[in-house]
Image (cartoon, rainbow, N blue to C red):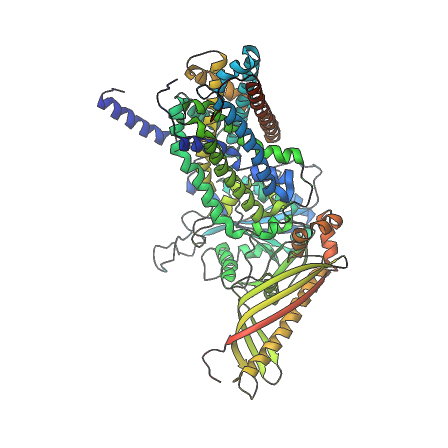
């Protein structure tokens, strides 16, 4: 890997925020409304706090070994074999979640825009696109994120702003919900949105000032989290919880119902989906990058490019496994939730062991 | 990269060409080859209509619900739908040919009927330009579950489509062709949308209706339309729902009462009222402001409506006296307040009698008294039951600011 070039703290923040703000934007309001009823905005904040905690752990442990990626330093901390097993799980986690996200992407396209295009083609297209981009090194990876970041954030801000006038304040009340939230899914589903923040464990070695990475990580999370929160607030505000439950992609419905300029421009959904593709692309880019990097470390390859290409057929195959939409969403929920728990637990373990065994250097020390 | 410049150019050109070739091939359909459905009218048909139905989606003797629908679709004829303002002369396609084609089919459900329709027309049907759906009163009384389900699932249908309830046969609406607009459904749509602009109807698209129907503390309502004479369309009132079924209809002036309670702007209704000693006056409402205050008194929701409207004097006749002083204005205001309070009160009582909370008072209870809500309301119909005997008090006042150009 090229080590001469480094990325700045701001760039790190942007990569994190564009990674986190992912394909789930379309369905997230419905998922959280189902789990938390009217308390959805509050639970989104609570879930974000969980994610910030995980992020804190990821960053702290990586800062102790600021010149290595997680895959290398885990071997120092807990020994070769346990690290191998754990990293295999990391690989599995990102492999499965990425495959599921590819499928979800295909499902949205097949349901809404390209109704006659075979879903295999939609999936294969984005898969090849992502895989090809992943053949670059980490610095170029950052630049791609940097370039697309405005396209990831702005369309959503635009849709939210345009639809804010239709918000009924009553729908936000009562803030603690009419029903008791289902705590576990209500916390896990927003928290697992931030799965991609794990990317910091491989980006830290190439950041200029690793000591300031915490700030960047926080900034990245806060930007995306506020967007997620705005999305939840606007969809719940416009549709109310009961109606949101009926919508598969509430955010898309929002884009579908805005009208601009005296109702001249209607049906922004096609345009919105195009921008969403970019959003999916950046997120998939990160998770695919993580997947291929972890696998190349497992196989002890020097270069992850070969693995990237080799992964394509497997990723494609797994993404086609779910038989229907319900199975797909059930799988993704389980994969994301357990992935989040595992990654946080793993990083926490590494951190504690590193502190106890005094491995690595203490940041700011 | 130290490739020769021409190789670069060639590669650049190749990627450009590829970009053109690789764009969506599967879903491309020329606009002339689409049957664009502009409007749908849905009537109930007698069970014997099952015989008229082609067997497209099921076998002949399948046990299916008795209920039958008759769907009348207005399909745009490509090339004949005038784009932009008609030039009124040559070349605007105005040779007496209708820009739309009206097709009638039968079916057990909307989707089935549309499938039967597809069997009869060559081009694939598209609902992307569906603007208006008219349903007959009978369909609304049977409940809109099936209809809503299909329209919600279909990504082609806009949330800004209009759903109208007609008091006569809905199919007639697909055939009336008022002279103001060339395409009948577009006239129907313009009719409702312009009345929103004039403050005569709340912006209640099908999407809004769905939201109201989904909320537990609220019921939906739709525009209630009728055909007057040969081809005049009239917005007759509100058709309000309870438990997903049509519960009743109101008069047009009740729309004004409803909009006053909800505080919709701009104000658009004009009221004719008798004022003691002053004869008859017409008051035009220009602005509405409303505040809903919800309280639980003795374990019962109590709604306090504070409505303020701004108005102006539009007409005054049938009395020897002229309106020339503040006291006269006060007298008119008082008479209006009395009449309007009465109207709002009566309309509220009417909806209570039909268990149809179109004002969404229940949502206030849900939002501000979650404990009370949780104790008493376990499903939507619980609130509909409770709504019937909540207390609603109306405080309405008006400020008349202007009296027009006439000095006396």
Looking at the image, which residue sits at the far left? B5
Relative to residue B72, is residue B264 depicted above or below? below
Residue A268 can be seen, yes or no: no
Left or right of residue B356, residue A19 in this image: left
Which quarter of the figure is the N terminus of chain A placed in? top left
Q: How many marks?
A: 0
B264 up-or-down from A330: above or below: below
Q: Nearer the viewer, residue B75 or B304?
A: B304
Q: Compared to B280, does A170 lie above or below?
A: above
B367 vs A365, nearest the viewer: A365
Q: In this view, does A86 lie above or below B60?
A: above
Q: Where is residue B168 in the image (x, y as percent from the top left)?
A: 62, 59
Asked whether, in this view, residue B162 is left or right of residue B375, the answer is left
* Location of residue B121 in the rendering, given as x and y in whole percent from the top left corner: 51, 42
Seen from this angle, which residue lies furthest right? B298
In-front residue for pair B176/A328: A328
Q: Residue at x 67, y 59 (%)?
A: B294
Q: Position of residue A69 (x, y in %)?
A: 47, 19
* Residue A158 visible in the displayed image: yes
Picture coordinates of residue A236 (x, y %)? 58, 45
């Amino acid at each position: 890997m090229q080590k001469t070039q480094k990325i700045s703290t701001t760039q790190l923040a942007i990569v994190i925020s564009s990674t986190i703000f992912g394909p789930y934007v379309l369905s997230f309001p419905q998922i959280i409304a189902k789990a938390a009823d009217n308390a959805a905005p509050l639970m989104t904040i609570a879930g974000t706090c969980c994610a910030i905690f995980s992020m804190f752990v990821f960053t702290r442990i990586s800062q102790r070994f600021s010149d290595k990626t997680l895959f290398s330093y885990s071997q120092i901390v807990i020994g070769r074999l346990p690290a191998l097993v754990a990293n295999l799980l990391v690989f599995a986690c990102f492999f499965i979640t990425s495959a599921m996200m590819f499928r979800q992407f295909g499902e949205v396209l097949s349901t809404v825009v390209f109704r006659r295009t075979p879903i295999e083609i939609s999936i294969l297209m984005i898969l090849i696109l992502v895989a090809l981009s992943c053949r670059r090194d980490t610095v170029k990876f950052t630049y791609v994120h940097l370039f697309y970041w405005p396209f990831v954030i702005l369309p959503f801000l635009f849709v939210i702003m345009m639809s804010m006038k239709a918000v009924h304040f009553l729908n936000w009340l009562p803030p603690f919900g009419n029903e008791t939230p289902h705590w576990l899914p209500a916390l896990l589903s927003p928290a697992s949105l931030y799965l991609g923040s794990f990317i910091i464990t491989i980006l830290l070695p190439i950041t200029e000032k690793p000591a300031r990475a915490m700030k960047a990580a926080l900034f990245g999370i806060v930007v995306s989290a506020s967007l997620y929160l705005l999305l939840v607030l606007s969809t719940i505000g416009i549709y109310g919880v009961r109606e949101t439950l009926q919508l598969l992609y509430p955010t898309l419905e929002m884009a579908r119902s805005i009208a601009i300029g005296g109702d001249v421009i209607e049906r922004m959904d096609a345009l919105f989906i195009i921008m969403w593709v970019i959003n999916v692309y950046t997120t998939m880019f990160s998770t695919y990058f993580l997947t291929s990097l972890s696998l190349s470390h497992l196989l002890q390859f020097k270069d992850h490019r070969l693995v990237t290409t080799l992964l394509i057929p497997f990723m494609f195959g797994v993404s086609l496994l779910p038989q229907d939409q319900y199975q797909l969403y059930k799988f993704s929920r389980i994969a994301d939730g357990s992935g989040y728990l595992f990654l946080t637990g793993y990083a926490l373990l590494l951190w504690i062991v590193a502190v106890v065994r005094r491995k690595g250097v203490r940041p700011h020390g | 990269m130290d490739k020769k410049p021409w190789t670069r150019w060639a590669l650049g050109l190749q990627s450009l060409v590829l970009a053109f070739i690789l764009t969506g091939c599967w879903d491309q359909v020329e606009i002339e080859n689409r049957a664009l459905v502009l409007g749908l009218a849905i009537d109930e048909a007698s069970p014997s209509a099952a015989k008229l139905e082609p067997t497209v989606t099921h076998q002949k003797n399948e046990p299916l619900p008795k209920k039958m629908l008759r769907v009348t679709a207005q399909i745009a004829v490509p090339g004949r739908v005038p784009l932009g303002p008609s030039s009124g002369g040559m070349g605007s396609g105005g040779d007496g040919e209708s820009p739309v084609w009206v097709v009638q089919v039968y079916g057990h459900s909307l989707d089935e009927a549309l499938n039967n329709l597809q069997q009869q027309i060559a081009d694939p049907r598209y609902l992307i330009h569906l603007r208006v759906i008219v349903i007959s009163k009978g369909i609304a009384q049977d409940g809109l579950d099936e209809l809503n389900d299909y329209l919600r699932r279909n990504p082609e249908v806009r949330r800004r489509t209009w759903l109208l309830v007609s008091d006569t046969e809905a199919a007639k609406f697909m055939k009336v062709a008022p002279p103001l607009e060339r395409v009948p459904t577009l006239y129907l749509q313009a009719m409702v949308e312009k009345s929103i602009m004039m403050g005569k109807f709340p912006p209640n698209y099908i999407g809004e209706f769905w939201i109201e129907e989904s909320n537990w503390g609220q019921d939906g309502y739709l525009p209630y339309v009728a055909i007057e004479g040969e081809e005049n369309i009239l917005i007759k009132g509100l058709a309000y729902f309870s438990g997903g079924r049509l519960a009743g209809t109101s008069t047009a002036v009740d729309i004004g009462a409803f909009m006053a309670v909800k505080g919709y702007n701009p104000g658009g209704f004009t009221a004719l009222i008798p004022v003691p000693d002053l004869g008859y006056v017409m008051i035009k409402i220009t602005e509405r402001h409303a505040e809903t205050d919800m309280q639980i008194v003795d374990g019962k929701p109590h709604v306090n409506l504070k409505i303020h409207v701004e108005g102006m004097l539009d007409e005054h006749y049938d009395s020897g006296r002229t309106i020339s002083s503040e006291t006269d204005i006060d007298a008119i205001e008082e008479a209006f307040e009395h009449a309007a309070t009465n109207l709002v009160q009566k309309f509220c009582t009417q909806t209570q009698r039909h268990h149809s909370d179109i004002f969404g008072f229940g949502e206030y209870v849900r939002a501000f008294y979650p404990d009370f809500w949780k104790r008493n309301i376990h499903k939507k119909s619980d609130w509909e039951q409770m709504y019937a005997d909540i207390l609603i008090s109306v405080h309405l006042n008006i400020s008349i600011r202007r009296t027009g150009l006439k000095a006396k």
